[in-house]
Amino acid sequence: MTRFWHRRSSEAIMLVGLALVGVFAWGYLGGTDQLNRAMQVPVIPAVSAGLILIVGLVGYFFAPLKSLQTSAAINYALLIITLALLVMQTDGLQSGYFPLLVATLGFAGAFGLGGIFAGTGGFAVFMIMQYMGRELGESDIMLLSLLCALPLIASFIIWGRSEKVTEETKKDRSYHELASELSQVSGKSEVVINAIGDGVLALNGQGTIELINPAAEQILGWDKHDSLTLTYKSILKMLDTKNKEVTDTNDPVALVLANNKPVKNDSFSLQTQSGKTFLASITVSPVGQPGQGVIVVFRDITTEKSDERQRAEFISTASHEMRTPVASIEGYLGLALNPATASIDPKAREFITKAHASAQHLGRLFSDLLDVSKADDSRLKNDPKVVDIVPFIHEIIQGLTPKATEKGLRVHYKPMPDGMSLENDPNRRLNPVLYSYVDNDHLREVVQNLIENAIKYTLKGEVVVDVTSSDSHIVISVTDTGIGIPREDQRHLFQKFYRVDNSDTREIGGTGLGLYLCRRLTETMGGRIWVESEYKHGSTFFVEIARIEHDEAQRRIEQASVEAEQQVAQEKLHAASLATPAEPQVTPLVDSSLPQPGVTPSTLPAPVTPSLPPTPAAPQSLQPTPAVNVNRTNTPITTIEANTARTTPRISVPPRQ
C-alpha cells in the first residue's frame, strides 16, 4: 500500500472522529428535542472519538513515513471500538450508527492484516457484549455474523488483490524503468566509445574480443566482423623494446587478468595487420571480479615520442652549452670576491655577491634541466651502494641547517634530535641500523631537495625529518608547517614543470622541476614518493626505499671492498706498464754480421761509428779499442752505406787511401 493511501485513510478516520465529536457537542448544546435524542453521542464514545482525532493528528504530522501504516492501523482499530461502543449505547442493532459500523468494516483490508484483525476483534467484542446482555438470540447472532463478515471478506479480497496488483505494477514499472535506463546508458556508452579517437577493445576472462570500436579498426587494420570472437593476441600484436613479441611475464593484458590491477605502458609497439609497427600507449583496466574481463585502450604516440625526444635533445644541448659560460661567470665572480685575488670596495662586493648567487642559481637550473633530459631519455645512471640511512641523512641535514637558521626555522631530526651525534646524545631514540642498497647520490639529491623545499615554503615553525622502517622498507618523511598544498593540485605535483599557482607560491618562485626529478630518481632507485598535505596546515613528503638486512649489507660491503682492491691493483699494474717503456728496436748502422769495436752485447748502441781498416789519417775516435779483442774484416764502403738506417744521422767517413 502506498504512502499516499495511508495519508488519505488517516484523514478519513480523523474526519469521522471530528464528526462524532461535533455531533456530541451539538447534542449537548442543542437541547433535548427528538432529533437530538436520535443523533446524540454518549460521553464515552465522544471521548474515544476525541482520542481518535488526537492520535490521528499526531501520527499525521509527526510520525515517520515508514511508521505511517502502523499509525493508520492503530487509529482504525480505535475507530472500530468507538463505533461499537456508540452502537451499544444507542439502541444496539436499532441504532442509527450500526450501518456506519458495518460500512467501516469494509475498509479493514486497506490496512493489511492489522486492519483485518482490528475489525474482526472489534466486531467480536460487540457480538459478545450483545449476547451477554441477552439482547440477541442465536438466529440473530448468525444473521449478524454473516452481515458483518461479508464486508470483512470483501475488503480482504478487494484490498489484498489491489495491493498485490499495485506491487506487481510497481515491479513492472521499476523493471521497465531500469531496462529503459540501461538501454539509454548503453546507447550513450556506445556513442562515446565509437566517437573517441583511441582504440578500445573489450575482452572477456579468456582474452576473447567482445567489442572493438572504429578507431581500433582503423589503427590496427582489422574489420569488426573479422576480429570479434578472436583472441586479442591475434590482432593486438605487442612488441617490446627489443622488437620481440611480449611474453606472459610482461604482457599487460595477462598481468591485469591475473592481478586485477590496472597497467599502463608507453614503451611497447603495436604491429598492424599489414606489418607496420608504431609506438603505442597501452592502458589496460580490469572489469568486475578478477579474471572476468578487461578494457584495453591504446593510441599511436610515435609523433609524441619524436617531439619529446627533440625537446629533450634541445634542452640537453642548450643546457650543456649555456652551463659552460655560466660556470665561467661564476668562477670569475668568485675570484673577484676572494680577497687573495682581488680588492674591491664594500658596495661593489655587495653587487658581486648578488650576481654570484644568481649565477649559482642559474647553474643549478641548468644542472636540473640536464638531469631531467637524462631521466626522460633513460640515461640516468644507477650505481647502488650500501648506505647507512640514519647518519647519511644526518649529514644532509647538517649542511642545510644554516639555511633554515637564516629564516628563523628549526630543523628537527627525530632519530638524532638537536643535531647531537649518536655517541653523545643521552636522550636519543633507539633506532635500528637501517641499511639500503641504493645510489647514494640519487638519495642525497632527493632528500636534499625535499628538505630545501620544506625550508623554502615554510614561513615560520619547524621542519621535522623522520626515518621509520618495516622488515622490507625504509620510509623517510619530511614534514613542514608551511603553506600546504590544495587537494586538487596534489595529484599533479610530481609532473614536469607543474607548479601550484596561487598567491603564496608566486612570491616564492620555482621551476617545477625539483619534485619531478625527485620522482624519477626515486623510481630509478626502485622506490616511491608521495605527499600528504592540507592547505594552510603544512605538508609531509614520504620516500620509500627497499631495506636490506645487516648480514646482506656486510656481505655487499665486503664484496665492494674486494672489488675496489682488485681495481686498485689493476690500475697500479697498468700504471707500472706505462712507466716502464719497452726495449727500443734500433736499426744497426752496419751489417749485423760485422763486429763493432768497443760494444758489448749487453750494451745498447748509441750512434755507432762503423769499423774501418786502420789508416794513418783516420781520426782517433775511429781507432779500435785496445781492450776488446775482435777480428776485423775489410768490408767495402758501399756495403756499409747501403746498410745504414735513414733514421740515424750518417757519419762522415774519410775516403779510402
Image (cartoon, rainbow, N blue to C red):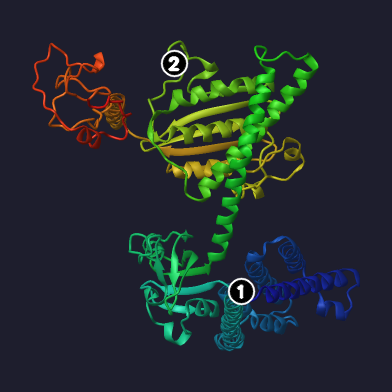
Q: Which residue lies at the image location 47% right of the left edge and 46% below the top edge?
A: 379
Which quadrant: the N terminus?
bottom right
Instruction: Determine which residue is flagged by label 1.
Output: 122
Disc 2 + disc 1, Cβ < 8 Å: no
Nearer-N-terminus badge (2/1): 1
The Cα–Cα distance between marks 2 and 1, rounded to whole angstroms, is 90 Å
Pinpoint residue 518: horizontal percent, then vertical percent: 54, 40
Residue 481 seen by the camera:
no
Pinpoint residue 417: horizontal percent, then vertical percent: 52, 19
User: What SS does tag 2 mark?
Assistant: loop
Left or right of 174, for residue 235: left
For residue 397, which quarter of the picture? top right
Left or right of 614, for residue 351: right
* Nearest to viewer (mark 2 / mark 1): 2
User: What SS does tag 1 mark?
Assistant: helix
Residue type highlighted by circle 1: Gly
Residue type highlighted by circle 2: Leu
The residue at the far front in this view is: 657
Q: Which residue lies at the image location 46% right of the left edge and 25% below the top edge?
A: 392
| Residue 498 numbered tag | none
